[in-house]
Amino acid sequence: TQLLEQSPQFLSIQEGENLTVYCNSSSVFSSLQWYRQEPGEGPVLLVTVVTGGEVKKLKRLTFQFGDARKDSSLHITAAQPGDTGLYLCASTLETSGSRLTFGEGTQLTVNP
Amino acid sequence: KAGVTQTPRYLIKTRGQQVTLSCSPISGHRSVSWYQQTPGQGLQFLFEYFSETQRNKGNFPGRFSGRQFSNSRSEMNVSTLELGDSALYLCASSLGWSREETQYFGPGTRLLVL
């Protein structure tokens, strides 16, 4: 059973389109992190959200943390080919100690 | 500041062999965590070491082991390799004082078991 569920698993869009990726859990997140991973590399941290209802922006990326701290979303505006990669949500769930638990990931392809 | 480094980057082994992977954390980081990434299971936590002691362990068989040295460098060993051990093995380092700290990942070691 996946503790963190991401959707969609795959997303292929055209340059300039908007998209949203979701991350949900039945457990409460102590904090939630979003990573991006490119082929042959390790995940790179994009943002950490901590407070319920929090919204963070990173250029064209907007991250939201649900009020109950059980869900999060990543919205990309006007996607570019450079946004292509595997997007992962992760958390140190309150039930799992200090280790990171990852979602399955969303493989995003932005076509020029 | 140099990032997390992992060696080797690529490795090919045959079933039954054993393998040792190495991870050098960011200078000053005392926690090193190891993860296995496969297409079917995604990223799964193997174990965490802090100050030369295993502090946390995931749900992997005893064939997977690790250790940490006094300079915080860590090694991971897999004995009696199986085909299913083919994966990208990632290590991540952090200061280690709080579970909320950011973990910084290395580029990984891609292991292929034939």
Image (cartoon, coloured by chain):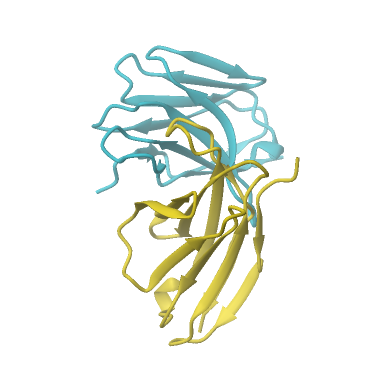
In which quarter of the view is residue B46 placed?
A: bottom left
Residue at (32%, 39%) from the top-left corner? A97
Residue B43 visible in image: no
In the image, residue A66 sits, relative to residue A14, either above or below, namely above
Q: Which tint is chain A? A: cyan
Q: Residue furthest front?
A: B70
Tell me how many marks there are: 0
In the image, residue A63 sits, relative to residue A42, either above or below, namely above
In which quarter of the view is residue A28 placed?
A: top left
Residue A37 visible in image: yes
In the image, residue B62 sits, relative to residue A80, either above or below, namely below
Please provide percent x and percent y for residue A29. Answer: 34, 28
Q: Is residue B51 left or right of residue A28?
A: right
Residue at (51%, 21%) from the top-left corner? A63
Among the chains pictured, the one given yellow colouring is: B
B93 and A78: which is toward the camera = B93
A58 and B102: which is toward the camera = B102
Please provide percent x and percent y for residue B103. Answer: 54, 40
A77 and B37: which is toward the camera = B37
Residue at (49%, 14%) from the top-left corner? A55
> In which quadrant will I find the N terminus of chain B?
top right
Please provide percent x and percent y for residue B37. Answer: 47, 58
